[in-house]
Amino acid sequence: MPFSRRQFIKGLSALPLLGASVPFLPTALAAATEQAITGRRIFNLLVNPEPPSLSSFNTTAGTTITASSKVLEGLLGYDETLAPQPALATAWEAAADGLSYRFTLRQGVKWHDGQPFTSEDVAFSLDLIKRFHPRGGGTFANLASVETPDTHTAIVRLSKPAPYLIRAFAAGETPILPKHLYASGDPLSNPHNNAPVGTGPYRFKQWQRGSFIEYERNPDYWNAGFPGVDTLFLKVIPDSAARLAAFENGSLDAGGQSPVPLSDLARITANGKLKFTTRGYAYSITPTMLEFNLDNPLLARHEVRQAIAHAIDREVIKKVVYYGYADVSVSPIPKSFAQYHYDGPDPYPFDVAKANALLDQAGLPKKGNSRFSLTLDPLPYGDSYARTATYIRSALARVGIDVQLRAQDFPTYIKRVYTDRDFDFAVVGMGTTFDPTVGVQRLFWSKNFRKGVPFTNGTHYNNPEVDRLLESAAVETDEAKRGELFKAFQKIVIEELPSITLVMQQQVTVFNSRVSGFEADANGLDGSLAAVTVTGEAVAHG
């Protein structure tokens, strides 16, 4: 029997932990905004949850990428077709054999502390990202060296071709760090991770934990006349109702990743003061997935995972959780990668009777209405993951699986899943990024099981054939052959179910009509925001 929205919302309201009220912005933010407002162009951007750090060289946390890319730049930018655009590099050339890239670097660029930007910074940063970034080991697996024949030339040498690499140099994905501030000591504990010094359009000013991050316009930015904003506030607003109010009263100018309940979109945009768009997400599409801890003896059993898959109706998640702003998907590679996407049948279609039969055959009979209990951890990032978890709890109850939902803050969730591995299964969102080798391989490649590193192979999946297919696709330069390798990989993981891909999200950005200039970037609000303009006055209240 399908779930109605009324039934779903009733179920959600019974979860006080997931809907707990969080106070709105502390008075420190209101004071800071009031102080800065006079005669200045202010842009108020939502970040939710609060970033764990402000430099993305060692994390794929979404809000860290948002914060980092305003200060730290990449070699390239990308338009909506993922065509590379100049940034810290003004020209680039790939060798015919695919084993090197030559970058001509922009001259006259200075770090925010006044030191010159050089090719040594590029070589240092790529090595650091290869070692510490959750995707770096895969993205730069074939990086052999970076030659620096002069201060404005960097030559990336590869041991094997990496056909995807030219799309990997965005600011949030591969930020260029100042070597002179990172060469000594442990880069993971470097104080500049939380007070970054970059070359970007904005300079770090202050971070009031739990409240806001303040950036100021870089007057020495290499792109003269930019940015068009004097002060950029990144506001931390954990509570959904408070975010909604902030958009409506004008104290938030923009927020991405579907920042308000999708059910409210039509109402809040009706008068034209607020708008929304699904543009600005071309660089990375986000699937909602159910990831199993395969170290759990019960979930290590294939028939249990098969039963769970049969019990879930993806159409309900699309319509009730995402209000239609999602595409049902069985495959972890989205349809936007038309040459790589596997479009075969779902081996485990929605079938409650089949799910019950599988669990009976597995020797897990019902005792009363319950067979066994599991704990489900939704990613604490917006509302959609908690809402998806609420649906899954209801769906699995129909086959005798008692699901307990667990709410926690973002750092606790990361530690629980990736360090302590103290979880049964989790509702997650993982960006597919600009290429499956970078965004999808990390979730299934056995060599990317890295305790303590977030958004890696959290299931602890290990299949040698999957490893072979992924590793072959990573170096295959023939697009047709590469597509066949990816399709063969998808067929295996769809059948083996280390995780269940549920939907591909159509992310929504909500923004004030006074804001423009972010939509054409493939990263949207996760780009530099150098080209953003605001008209009129910002509202000076928290």
Image (cartoon, rainbow, N blue to C red):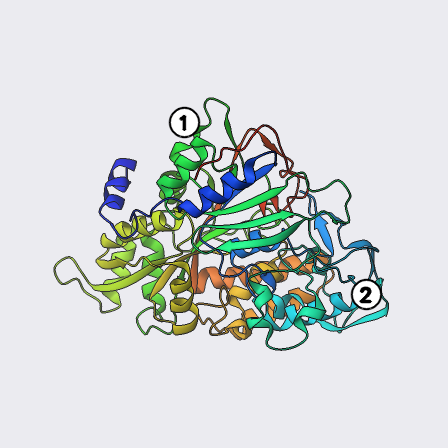
Q: Position of residue 286 (x, y in %)?
A: 51, 50
* Earlier sequence position, callout 2 versus callout 1: 2
Q: Amino acid at mark 2?
A: Ala
Q: Residues within 10 Å of mark 1 (few under 14, many from 20)?
A: few
- What is the C-alpha distance between the residues marked 2 and 1? 51 Å
Classify 211 as above or below 446: above
- As drawn, the residue found furthest toward the left would be 368
Q: Residues within 10 Å of mark 2 (few under 14, many from 20)?
A: many
Along the viewing direction, whichever of 538 and 153 lies nearer the viewer = 538
Residue 466 in sight in this render: yes
Q: Which residue is located at x 47 percent, y 21 percent?
A: 271
The image quarter in which residue 537 lies: top right
Question: Which residue matches tag 2?
Answer: 154
Q: Amino acid at mark 1?
A: Arg
Q: Which residue is located at x 41 percent, y 68 percent?
A: 415
Classify 92 as above or below 534: below
Q: Which mark is residue 267?
A: 1
Q: Which residue is located at x 30 percent, y 51 percent?
A: 18
